[in-house]
Image (cartoon, rainbow, N blue to C red):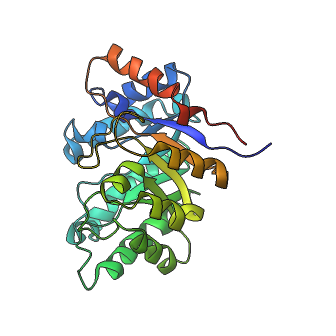
Amino acid sequence: MPLMPLHAYSTMFYTCLPPLKAIERIMNHGLLAELSYDNLAILGGAFMEDMYIVELLRVSSDLRGHIRAIHMPYDELDPQRALSEPGYRRFFKWLNLARRLEIGLAVIHTLRIDRGHENALRLNLEFLEGIVEEAEESGIVVAVENRLERACYGSSPRDLLAIIEGLGGRVRICLDLGHAHINGNLEESLQALGRHMAAMHVHDNDGVKDLHKPPYTGTIRWSLVENWITRVRFDGVLVFEVSCKGDIQTCDRLVEEVKSSPIANIQPR
């Protein structure tokens, strides 16, 4: 039987809830989750995350097998901070959380550094080398996500291919479809990065703002994505990264809406 993607639903569907509560809502739908940093960012970020991490670890045995990916913090990625001992210590804390919850995929952004910076690639390789070494000890795959900010290193397929090559293929890619759409390189990214992709972040927008809308409600050409998935028999993870900040019942309905959408029900040819 042909391989097809695994599906996971981001805790961003319940941005109003703490991480554990959001995961539990997704589990109640019978779905796998991606633990997103967004749920912590809105509740205080680095200043509050230890409390929520402890809460997750307290019920780790109940969560194992229900979380397919973890989205690492993205708010302290300037090179001076990220490459410091405290910076690495924070990322290692998140990798330890992934290990304890038996999450096999960690999604991470590139450093916040301009594409034109003469050391952009070197600094990113230095940063990611440290992350990958720690992750590999626990059998965790690191997937680098394409940047939204067009001026930042990591927003283009060429940048990401250079990172893959520089690290000897030890990282994979998480292609954020919304980011690629805004940057005008979605089709190029699918073609150039396809064989390196471990995951996709699936959501829609108007081509201008990072709206994290449900698929088919913006301007992404979904036939392009659907045809690519079936043609290459993509067997990575489709993470539906839709944001809902409404009441829980509204967010529940949004999960079911996305769950019934065509891209969530692609059949092998």
- Foreground pick, 253 / 217: 217
Q: Quadrant of residue 32?
A: top right
Identity of the residue drawn at 24% across and 66% down: 112
Identity of the residue drawn at 35% across and 79% down: 121
Where is residue 50? Give x, y as percent. 29, 42
- Foreground pick, 54 / 252: 252
**In the displayed structure image, the side of residue 231 where residue 67 appears, left or right:** left
Q: Residue furthest right?
A: 1
Identity of the residue drawn at 36% across and 57% down: 91
**In the displayed structure image, the side of residue 174 where residue 170 appears, left or right:** right
In the rendered view, tell whether residue 72 sits above or below residue 144. Answer: above
Q: Quadrant of residue 58?
A: top left
Identity of the residue drawn at 48% across and 49% down: 200
Which quarter shows the C terminus?
top right
In the rendered view, tell whether residue 164 sits above or below residue 39. Answer: below
**In the displayed structure image, the side of residue 81 where residue 6 appears, left or right:** right
Where is residue 11? Give x, y as percent. 39, 34
Where is residue 255? Give x, y as percent. 44, 24
In the rendered view, tell whether residue 140 sits above or below residue 210. Answer: below
Q: Quadrant of residue 68?
A: top right
**In the displayed structure image, the side of residue 147 where residue 160 appears, left or right:** right
- Foreground pick, 44 / 61: 44
- Foreground pick, 195 / 17: 195
Where is residue 251? Give x, y as percent. 35, 21
